[in-house]
Image (tube, rainbow, N blue to C red):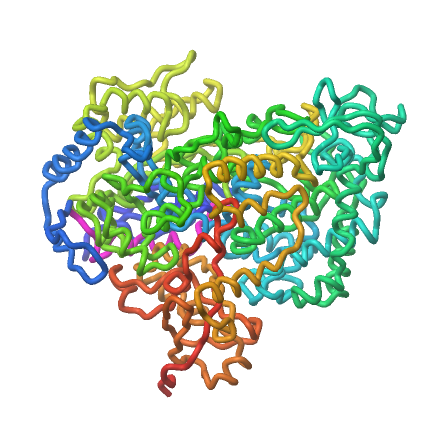
Amino acid sequence: MSALKDVRRFPSFCYNCVSGPDFLQVKVEDGVAVEVEPNFKAADIHPGRGRPCVKAYGLVQKTYNPHRILTPMKRTNPKKGIKENPGFTPISWDEAFDIIAARLNAIKAKGLIDESGAPRLAASFGHGGTPANYMGSFPAFLAAWGPIDYSFGSGQGVKCTHSEHLYGEFWHRAFTVAADTPRCNYLISCGANVEVTGGPTAVIRHADARVRGYKRVHVEPHLSITASCSAEWVPIRPKTDPAFLFALIHVLVCEHGTQKLDLPFLRDRTASPYLIGPDGFYLRDADSEKPLVFDTVSGCAVAHDAPGAVPAVDGRYKVSRAITIGPDGARENFADIEAPTAHETLIEHMAGYSPEWAEQICDVPAKTIRRIANEYLEAATIGATIEIDGQTLPLRPVAVTLGKSVNNGWGAYECCWARTVLAALVGALENPGGLLGTTLRINKPQDNRHKSAKPGEDGFMVQYFNPTSAEAWEHTPTTRNLHRSLVPIVGRNGGWSQALGPTQLAWLLSEKVPDDWNFPQPTYPELWFVFRSNPAISFWQTRELAASIAKFPFMVAFAYTLDETNAMADILLPDATDFETNQLIKISNTKYMEHFWRHTGVVLRAKAVEPQGDARDFSWISGELARRVGLLEKYVTQLNRGVGGVAPLKSETYDFSLDPAVAPKPEEIWDAACKAATAALSGGTACHGLDWFREHGFWATPMSELEWYLTPTLAQQGLRYELPYQERLMRVGQELGNRLHEKNMRWWDEQLAEYVALPGWHDIPGRWTRALENAGCAPENFPFWLLSTKSMQYHSGGNAGIALMDEVSQNLHGHTGVMMNADTAAKLGIAEGDRVEVRSQIGATYGRAALMQGVRPDTIVILGQFDHWATPYIKDQERASLNTIAPMSIELTDATGSGADIVRVAVRRMERAAP
């Protein structure tokens, strides 16, 4: 009879993607993790009811992956490149630290900033910032170090919903934007594949909504998972979503008219009443410089915040005297003019964008567009209210959501603007049932967007633009992606601002600068930290990008297995993975995607098993690095400030601070973090340490759902949304143009053209045609649009080396192949399973054909990002990848610095599938 096993369960979370954190339990038998289970103890707390998604179930294989790097490694081959064997050899932790510390101390001796004005130390972290939830106290080390260049991206700008991040922070104080699914009744989804990217929370909420009777119209060139779960699929032509959305606005403002819209919301919560001058800028009071509105009570133009005024929303009005303020403070005086309101200007601007016009561009019937617009307006139930926690709010249960490559790259500004205007027109912007912002990243404090919604100029929220004035503009860039010099809206200068700059420029400019370049010559960072980031696969033009990585002087990679990027590292450090370390994070307000929480609190990822091999806790690694480079006191000071944790370790009511003279052990760090977090969030009524959390997993207290909605906060402060007229964006764009032109630089002029107050249609798909022509190619030789899509199991390809995830993917048709229209394939002589070549103007990628009707005849779709050559297991499975053949270029980069996952390609059969 066998001995009884020691079976234990440890609470944990999965935050491998931005759909988390998802609660779970790790089942451990005799010290070995054997199973991932839901944590149903959190069913009433976690929006996903205590269930993780499929990715979490691969973590057991991840822990015991035979290909794991389990000891520090040193490169012995000085040559780097795809075809070079790095010759990694095991070394001790002491030797690894000695090598790294010597490099860091040499940088400190020379100065942290190099001759170009950029930091000598760079760092890149992967998907959506989620690695911060796995790197322990490393953020405290980075904060103790000083200036770091985070501008070498691992996919952000081209893979993330980049423009939505920036305009979401601008209009919503939110990094991401979602529908209020628990209360929404009608949703127009333009490529927002939320059944995949939203995790169990989104799957559950949308399923509940369907049972409740809501309708989702999914607009996308192919039948994605979300499209297949929707009431209606609209197969739109790629990159024409702005035309579709403009036509919806046309129906509302030109066919239905202002009186059928949410007039009070437009009047009181938006800039719709602001009067527009002949030069396109707001008309302003000559003395106060405040924007003018036409007061229907007094019958004259008054300042927008004049007491007792009832502004007109539409129409044109006489103004006897006013000024405008243009770029660089240029003032114009006007007398006895007739001026339209911003809303009237919108009506006139949208007049030509009828459904009949849009049909010719986006290949969606005009009657379909008009019907959807009418359904949206009817479902908005303008005038309805709802009571939430004793407060009566408007109920506007409609929303428009955007997906990747709709809300990044050329056309993204138009889509983000149109989507937000559609919400404003019916009062659904940041009101129950409508369009809501989620996690905050650029503005502060990052855990509460309401606190960042402070009064600014012109009656709007304060905005922290990067300076564009002649005196303050950053003419010597401080990062290699020029985020402060080229992208005013990205704001501030923290790590998130850098990471949301034009990250592809950091790669492009390291190889070649434009002919009229007049900034300092770009440099490589002298040391580059990389963690959970594989830009040699996850960016574009990957073979060329890998060649750029090979030129970096020194790379330190925190490595799980060998991959395409860390194969070119100088030192590999094996950090402990998901089950092998403790980490505490906050749950509260909104967290990415659709995670609108009803509780605030904290959750622990509890150490369930000992680290494999000689892998070490990231917090231990951080402390050792700090000690060896003379930063221990600064490092512990940052820990005491709460960096890397949830709350400061010391306040007026508690003190769990650590001794700055002693390197704290990881358990001491997290014990103090647990106690400080519960004491801070409970107001001192709770105080739980690490041992308590290892047993219970999480601590939470109810939170008002009013926290979900930003409009009540703006109303309390008398603030308006900066819509529909983007006067300030237009001004800063013109100022930016002045600065660049003063430096005799014209290479960013295409991007400058995007700074308009009311975006209009321009031939967005034609930009890819012109890019082909400019590359010397005939567009007709590349007749198909290649798009990428996501799967829940692959996590953007980040866990492709886990065999279980690949096995699950093979059960889903198309998820390991090249998806194309069956009729198109027949014309090309391609059968199911045939090996096909997908070729762009820069190269080719290969995979197996997956034929279906649910994709437009002019469109090819490939999942995720693959074509690995170093990552174990997946490198032996042929998987096509858009990234291999999508060119990186300034030409296809928009004004926010983003690009779209789309490329023109040709397709041909290579061999017949085996019978």
Q: Position of residue 722 (x, y in %)?
A: 66, 35
Q: Position of residue 515 (x, y in %)?
A: 40, 49
* Residue 471 belongs to the span the image colors magenta: no
Q: Image point 34% across, 56% down: which residue? A: 799
In the image, is 527 to the left or to the right of 95?
right
Q: Image point 17% across, 60% down: which residue? A: 84
Q: Which residues are magenta?
A: 49-71
Kindly give the residue lying farthest to the top in the view shown: 652
In the image, is 721 to the left or to the right of 802?
right
| Closer to the camera in the image, 799 or 36 | 799
Q: Position of residue 318 (x, y in %)?
A: 86, 31
| Closer to the camera in the image, 394 or 323 | 323
In which quadrant is the C terminus drawn? bottom left
| Closer to the camera in the image, 741 or 386 | 741
Q: Position of residue 348 (x, y in %)?
A: 78, 48
Quadrant in which residue 9 is drawn: top left
In which quadrant is the N terminus drawn? bottom left
Q: Is residue 759 above or below residue 705?
A: below
Examine the rendering and report whether any part of residue 200 can be seen: no
Q: Image point 11% across, 36% down: which residue? A: 94
Quadrant in which residue 502 is drawn: top left
Q: Image point 36% across, 84% down: which residue? A: 911
Q: Is residue 241 above or below residue 823?
A: above
